[in-house]
């Protein structure tokens, strides 16, 4: 693969992906939605592999939202079964390549067999330091915030913290993403311009990249394009261009 133009020293530390368009991909080809999800699994493999090869430390994949439980029973069942098989098949590879798998979301709502496989994969990979794959399953950004508020309120009630102690770092640490840095880049496939209840607290200055490519067609080449576009962006974090250039200059000067 030609990585021409990609600056390996300025890669995102955390890429988050809203994988969308499996259904449309299938409909365009007269196939079942489930076939679309099956093809989508190969794209999951492609982005995990390329992230690992490039040395991107963290990848979040929005695989199943809380709202997805409302889909037809057959489709939910097929997605759960795909997930289970994916975890079984990929676990040895994750172990070999130093990939840690972590799931976030309402794991307790998953079918018992999926939960068992998931927890097994989490345990088997928990000491891996090469890269973290965060799988968002039955995840909802708002629910994540509600749970954080409940935990913090309980701790204040128990006297562990005072209300005045609460700051942004503490809130971040109590989100499901915990110590994982905020995403630098959020990719959404299939052209929709929305967050769909994925990360809400975690993306204040995340660069957003939306591509019309449907998820089953999003492979190495498309991922690379997203990374190149990310490197073309000028991130200011609310500051002026002059301030950003000055701080870059200072950093390079080693002061
Ligand atoms: C969105 O397409 C995709 C999903 C709801 C599920 C994502 C699942 C996979 C990529 C397959 C397996 C995942 C793993 C981690 C092995 P959509 O159905 O919303 O597409 P549409 O908007 O075109 O209908």
Image (cartoon, rainbow, N blue to C red):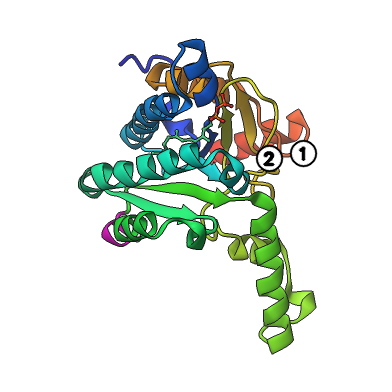
- Marks 1 and 2 in Cβ contact (< 8 Å): yes
Q: Position of residue 28 (x, y in %)?
A: 51, 11
Residue appearing at x 24%, y 42% in the figure: 89
Mark 2 CB lies closer than 8 A to ligand 1: no
When asked about the image quadrant of residue 48, the answer is top left
Tell me the mark number nearer the camera, choosing from 1 and 2: 2
Q: Secondary structure at mark 2?
A: loop
Relative to residue 175, is residue 239 depicted above or below?
above
Q: Residue furthest front?
A: 73
- The reply, left or right, for residue 100 in relation to residue 243 is left
What stretch of residues is rendered in magenta?
Answer: 123-128
Q: Position of residue 78 (x, y in %)?
A: 41, 39
**Label 1, label 2: how many angstroms apart (C-alpha)?**
9 Å
- The reply, left or right, for residue 119 in relation to residue 164 is left
Q: Position of residue 217 (x, y in %)?
A: 44, 18
Could one spot residue 58 in this view of the protein?
A: no
Mark sitting earlier along the chain (1/2): 2
Q: Position of residue 190 (x, y in %)?
A: 58, 21
Residue appearing at x 39%, y 27% in the figure: 43
Q: Which residue is mark 1?
A: 238
Query: In this view of the protein, which residue sits in the foreground, 7 or 46?
Result: 46
- The reply, left or right, for residue 123 in relation to residue 151 is left
Residue appearing at x 56%, y 24% in the figure: 189
Q: Is residue 220 magenta?
A: no
Q: Which residue is mark 2?
A: 205
Q: Residues within 10 Å of mark 2 (few under 14, many from 20)?
A: some
């Amino acid at each position: 693969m030609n990585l021409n133009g990609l600056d390996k020293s300025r890669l995102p530390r955390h890429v988050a992906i809203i994988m969308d368009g499996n259904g449309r991909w299938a409909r365009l080809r007269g196939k079942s939605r489930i076939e679309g999800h099956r093809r989508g699994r190969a794209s999951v493999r492609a982005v995990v592999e390329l992230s690992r090869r490039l040395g991107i430390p963290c990848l979040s994949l929005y695989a199943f939202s809380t709202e997805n439980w409302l889909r037809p029973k057959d489709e939910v069942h097929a997605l759960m079964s795909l997930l289970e098989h994916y975890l079984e098949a990929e676990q040895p590879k994750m172990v070999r390549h130093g990939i840690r798998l972590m799931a976030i979301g309402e794991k307790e709502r998953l079918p018992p067999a999926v939960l068992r496989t998931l927890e097994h994969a989490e345990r088997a990979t928990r000491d891996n330091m090469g890269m973290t794959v965060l799988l968002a399953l039955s995840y909802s950004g708002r629910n994540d915030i509600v749970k954080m508020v409940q935990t913090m309120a309980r701790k204040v009630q128990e006297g562990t913290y005072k209300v005045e102690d609460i700051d942004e770092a503490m809130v971040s640490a109590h989100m499901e993403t915990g110590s994982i840095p905020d995403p630098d880049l959020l990719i959404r496939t299939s052209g929709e311009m929305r967050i769909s209840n994925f990360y809400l607290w975690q993306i204040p200055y995340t660069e957003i990249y939306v591509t019309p490519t449907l998820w089953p067609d999003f492979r190495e080449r498309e991922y690379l394009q997203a990374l190149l576009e990310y490197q073309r962006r000028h991130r200011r974090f609310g500051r002026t261009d002059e301030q950003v250039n000055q701080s870059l200059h200072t950093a390079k000067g080693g002061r």
